[in-house]
Image (tube, rainbow, N blue to C red):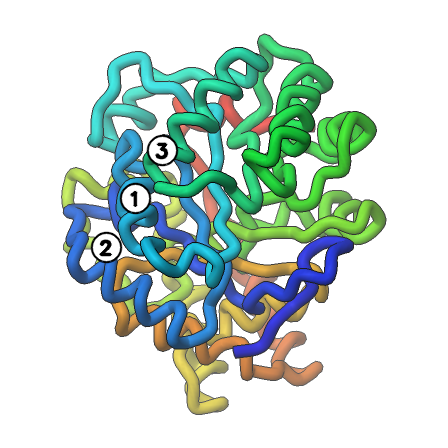
Amino acid sequence: MQYRQFADTDIQLSKLGLGAMGMSFSYGKADNQESLKTLDLALELGINFWDTADIYGNGANERLIGESLKGRRDKVFLASKFGFVLDTPTDDYIESLVGNPVHVDGSPKYIKAAVDASLSRLNTDYIDLYYMHRPDPNTPIEESIGALADLVQEGKIRYIGVSEFSAEQLKIANQVHKISALQSEYSLLTRDVESEILPLTKELGMAFIPFSPLARGLMSNALNVESLTDSDFRKKNPRFEDEYLVNNQNIAAGISEIAESKNMTSAQLALAWVMAQQDNIIPIPGTKRRKYLEENAKSVDVTLTHSEMHAVQALLERYPNVGPRYATSESKFIDKK
């Protein structure tokens, strides 16, 4: 495994992290035994950066991570998130987010209750990196970050992160307390952050953590869309429907051709492309299976040539109709500025 510096600290994180969300919800039925074995393998492979959140399975994912961490908490740099609150608690992703009985709470009172609940589920007395999952339109950013700063002082969290903040929001947050990481979607299909956000993270000395770096499996060129179950979030995602799906499968096929010429998989090439954009980028592809974890881990050794990067760019320009990131009901949580 290769490692990258975390923000402006001396902490070395695996160049590729592990997103644990799919182990507990949103991508079909959970398999805790396989997930625990996958987490074991992650440490064997040197992947020391794990990502979870309290909303994932209504706490189930944090409990799973907590079980895996017993006796080896010091080996993992652990990230979790708060902010999404279900109006009616449920483990069903389709019902909870696509159906939209959910809101964001970034109030200081909620933050302090949320971190204590996460610490209990994770079976730990500190979280290395604690993210605000989305901006709260009803709470000033200064108040939310101020409450997180209090948690740093209390030793409950070590570093503050934010997720899906705009450049303007990120600057405001960083004026209150050092923000060490920004997590946002970034992949071959989602490149909104390139013009302003990525340069800003470098300027402010923070890590950029891409989620869904494989475009929710589309860029693996191995996903059978017809096999997705009704409990899979992607069934309702625009990028998996109609003309958008055709466009994106064309991109995936092109990526596969480039990958085959380098004797690697499409997923490895797609992850290598993300990591090549800046040296502060640490993607967190999610998986609940050892097979895919091993495949993803090998991407850290891939070097893309100038001609290969050019070929990828040409492919993306040829098929620009990738579609919206989310259905309308979910898109309101993304700041458009």
Q: Which residue occupies the foreground of this view, 78 or 318?
A: 78
Percent position (x, y) of residue 173? Answer: 74, 28
Identify residue for label 3: 120
Q: Closer to the camera, 9 or 99?
A: 9
Mark sitting on residue 210: none
Q: CA distance from mark 1 to mark 2?
A: 9 Å
Residue underneath mark 1: 234
Q: Nearer the viewer, mark 3 or mark 1?
A: 3
> Residue at label 2?
225
Q: Is residue 207 left or right of residue 178?
A: left
Left or right of 243: which side holds 64?
left
| Residue beneath the point at 55% across and 68% down | 14
Q: CA distance from mark 3 to mark 2?
A: 37 Å
In contact (CB < 8 Å): disc 3 and disc 2: no
The amino acid marked with disc number 1 is Arg
Mark 3 or 2: in front is: 3
Mark 1 / mark 2, whichever is N-terminal: 2
